[in-house]
Structure formats: structure tokens, C-alpha cells
Amino acid sequence: MFDGITKFEVQVKPEDLDELNHVNNVVYMRWLEMAAREGSADAGWPTERYFREGLGAWVVRKHWIEYLRDCKLGDIIEVYTWVQEFSVSTSLRRYAMKVNGKLCCVAATEWVYIDLKTRRASELPEQVESCFRIVPADDPRLKELGIARPVRYLPTAMRTTHGA
């Protein structure tokens, strides 16, 4: 059964490097998208299912990313992701990446669930939401995995639920 945290590994390839010989920021963004897709699939909602059922789909409203240390050619990156919070039509998905056992990147994405016909924000259907397990910021597993770190911004949709 899906416990709410998805983990997979990627190895840094030559095409992932920029002129400074470390992973380019665009590559980290690609890994975030890969992680989100994997996390959704682990919850029973691979990308194809959203379209097959015609209910809606997720689109990005905002990304936040913090780079903590360089990743270089050949490094094996552990990528973790989890959904920290849902609101009516949004989710806050968190990410953490580790290299050699140390955090190298933390990130968050505010995703908006849209109606496929109107392309506008839509209330998240219960049949989708119920498949995801929320992993709150204070979940002890995050600390055990060495990936607990607060988000340093508050996504727009989450401000009303946090009194900001």
C-alpha cells in the first residue's frame, strides 16, 4: 500500500551538466516533474488515467526550489516526493533530493487541478483526492529519511488556511 512518499534514483549524465560542470537548474526541474508523475502513479493516478477518465489534470502554478550542494557527473541522486497539503483545487507537493546521503535540493510545487474542457481550476474530485496520502511537514518519517526541511515560502492557495 502506498505510504505517501515516493522515492526513485537518477544518475547524473553528461547532458545534465552545464558549463560549470554541475547539474543545470533545468534538469532539477525535469526531475521534479518526473517525481510528481511517479508520486501520482504510486497513488493510483498515472498521467494516462487522468485523461482516460476525462476528469481533469494537474498543471503547475508555482515552483520553489533551493539548491544546497552541487551534483556532478555520475552522482546517484535519491529523489523523494510527497503531497503535503490539499485545498479545494490545489495541492502542495514537496520534494527533496540527496546525493551521497546529504540534501542537495529541496523544492515545492503548487499544483492546480483543472477541468480538461474549460482549462480552468476545478474542485478536486473525491475519487482522486482519496487516493493520495497527505504527509504533513512534521511527519517523523521525513526526519528519519533526512529530508525534513521547511518550505521558505507559502504558496498562494495555502495562505488562507495558514492565516497569512
Image (cartoon, grey):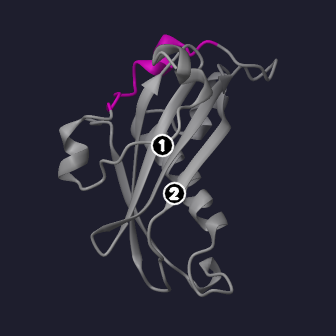
Quadrant of the rendered image containing residue 98: bottom left
Q: Counting other residues with Cα less than 10 Å from the Cα at mark 1, is it few (<14), some (14-19), or many (20 or more)?
A: few
Q: Is residue 127 left or right of residue 140?
A: right
Residue at (54%, 59%) from the top-left corner? 31
Q: Is residue 94 left or right of residue 32?
A: left
Verify CB contact (< 8 Å) between mark 2 and mark 1: yes
Outermost residue toward the right? Answer: 118
The amino acid beneath tag 2 is Glu
Q: Secondary structure at mark 1?
A: loop
Considering only vertical position in the picture, is 162 above or below 92?
above
Instruction: Mark 2 vs mark 1: give the one in front.
Output: 1
Residue at (54%, 14%) from the top-left corner? 160
Quadrant of the frame with the N terminus? top left
Q: Secondary structure at mark 2?
A: strand
Residue at (56%, 41%) from the top-left corner? 109
From the top left corner, tell me how far across and down residue 8 is, in percent. Answer: 38, 59
The amino acid beneath tag 1 is Arg
Which stretch is magenta? Answer: 123-136
Q: What predominant SS class does the magenta segment belong to?
A: loop
Considering only vertical position in the picture, is 49 above or below 11?
above
From the top left corner, tell me how far across and down residue 79 is, in percent. Answer: 41, 59
Using the image as rendered, state which of residue 93 and residue 5 is in the foreground: 93
Quadrant of the rendered image containing residue 113: top right
From the top left corner, tell me how far across and down residue 47 is, in percent. Answer: 59, 39
Considering only vertical position in the picture, is 86 above or below 33?
above
From the top left corner, tell me how far across and down residue 78 is, in percent. Answer: 37, 64
Residue at (62%, 23%) from the top-left corner? 53
Q: Which residue is mark 2?
A: 66
Asked if the magenta segment contains residue 116, the reply would be no
Q: Which residue is mark 1?
A: 152
Q: CA distance from mark 2 to mark 1?
A: 9 Å
Quadrant of the rendered image containing residue 59: top right
